[in-house]
Image (cartoon, grey):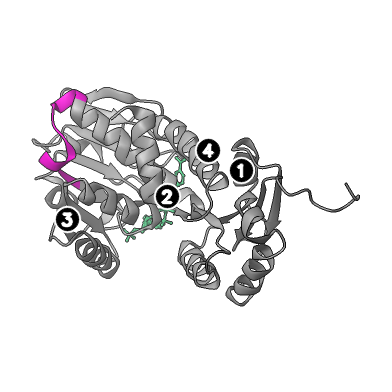
């Protein structure tokens, strides 16, 4: 083979990132998922996307393109959604490239959390998600909004609690439209528990499950309120930076009792499934001819991983 010319058959992943420095975490996971080469394209602007995708589409021809994959990541999740949209619109048959989509880890994290909750609900309550109501505290963000869709698609009633009520309303409207039913409703919950005037209790009091998807290091559900929630049986938290959103929850709790009759799922036990799901999601994209692999595909993989 001529030196410097890529041999067709090498699995090459273009990592399109809106961050200045594409995440080393994702670069390593992409290699571990089976890439022969990862090409980090950082500091991506929306104007760059179409040309980059077109440039990646043609050199290997309609057959060789199967060995080319795109991974879209970055901390600006809304911008990443736009990158995805432009990339999809740039492609046409037979020049289609499989895309793995996991900005800020939001797709795989929401998938792992909902799968772990589904397992706890089955094992501890002998119920399925379609039997329960779940409150998502700070559900207006990247992880929370995706979790709302996954819970609702599996039949749960969902309360999206957030201080930015318009953001919570938007999540509820989008999910309800997507599933064709009114299963998700917004509720005001203050950002800081010091401003709480009973809204947190109100948003959680009818729920069997309360999860927190807040920014790091913010208590969303103090023990004092949790103890008053008669219906709540399972809690979960994705934030691994102390203090956790659910007060008293252990980082690595894997459905252990937090208080009598309430089972807790900590961020490290969610993080383990998240990592495995990301590996499998990227592996699937690397070995697929086309398609987008995002939070719904990650959820199927996470359910398989936890056995639910
Ligand atoms: N375990 C893992 O593997 C993993 C992977 C990815 C992310 N995470 C964690 O998942 C959590 C959610 O991530 P995300 O990307 O969805 O976060 P995000 O979108 O930045 O924030 C989530 C929500 O937190 C609230 N919030 C934002 N800043 C706040 C502040 N200063 N004080 C109190 N509340 C605040 C907002 O809700 P309001 O509308 O209520 O203000 C926001 O919608 C983070 O803790 C992150 O570290 C974990």
Q: Is residue 99 above or below residue 109?
A: below
Q: Residues within 10 Å of mark 2 (few under 14, many from 20)?
A: many
Tag 1's secondary structure?
A: helix
| Disc nearer the start of the sequence (4/2) | 2
Ligand 1 neighbours mark 4 (CB distance < 8 Å): no
- Determine if the magenta segment contains residue 133: yes
Q: Alpha-carbon distance for marks 4 and 3?
A: 43 Å
Q: Position of residue 66 (x, y in %)?
A: 60, 51
Q: Residues within 10 Å of mark 3 (few under 14, many from 20)?
A: few
Contact check, label 4 and label 2, Cβ < 8 Å: no
Q: Which mark is residue 139?
A: none
Q: Which mark is residue 197?
A: 3
| Disc nearer the start of the sequence (2/1) | 1
Using the rendered image of the protein, determine whether residue 306 is visible from the camera's viewpoint.
Answer: yes
Q: Alpha-carbon distance for marks 3 and 2?
A: 32 Å
Q: Position of residue 196 (x, y in %)?
A: 22, 54
Q: Alpha-carbon distance for marks 2 and 1?
A: 15 Å
Tag 3's secondary structure?
A: loop
| Disc nearer the start of the sequence (3/2) | 2
């Amino acid at each position: 083979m001529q030196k410097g010319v890529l041999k067709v058959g090498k699995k090459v992943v273009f990592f399109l990132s809106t961050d200045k420095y594409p995440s080393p975490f994702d670069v390593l996971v992409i290699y571990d998922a089976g890439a022969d080469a990862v090409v980090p394209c950082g500091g991506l602007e929306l104007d760059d996307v179409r040309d980059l995708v077109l440039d990646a589409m043609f050199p290997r021809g309609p057959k060789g393109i199967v060995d080319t994959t795109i991974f879209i990541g970055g901390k600006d999740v809304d911008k990443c959604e736009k990158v995805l949209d432009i990339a999809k619109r740039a492609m046409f048959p037979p020049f289609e490239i499989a895309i793995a989509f996991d900005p800020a880890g939001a797709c795989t994290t929401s998938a792992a959390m909902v799968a772990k909750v589904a397992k706890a609900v089955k094992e501890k309550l002998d119920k399925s998600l379609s039997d329960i109501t779940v409150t998502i505290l700070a559900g207006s963000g990247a992880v929370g909004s995706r979790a709302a869709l996954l819970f609702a698609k599996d039949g749960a009633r969902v309360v999206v609690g957030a201080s930015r009520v318009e953001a919570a309303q938007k999540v509820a409207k989008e999910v309800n439209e997507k599933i064709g039913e009114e299963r998700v409703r917004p509720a005001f919950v203050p950002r800081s528990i010091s401003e709480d005037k009973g809204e947190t209790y109100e948003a959680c009091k009818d729920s069997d499950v309360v999860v927190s998807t807040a920014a790091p290091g913010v208590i969303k559900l103090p023990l004092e309120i949790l103890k008053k929630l008669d219906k709540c049986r399972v809690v979960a938290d994705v934030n691994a930076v102390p203090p956790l959103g659910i007060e008293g929850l252990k980082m690595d709790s894997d459905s252990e009792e937090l208080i009598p009759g309430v089972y807790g799922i900590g961020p490290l036990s969610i993080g383990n499934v998240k990592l495995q799901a990301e590996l499998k999601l990227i592996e699937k994209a690397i070995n697929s001819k086309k398609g987008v692999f995002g939070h719904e595909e990650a959820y199927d993989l996470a359910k398989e991983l936890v056995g639910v």
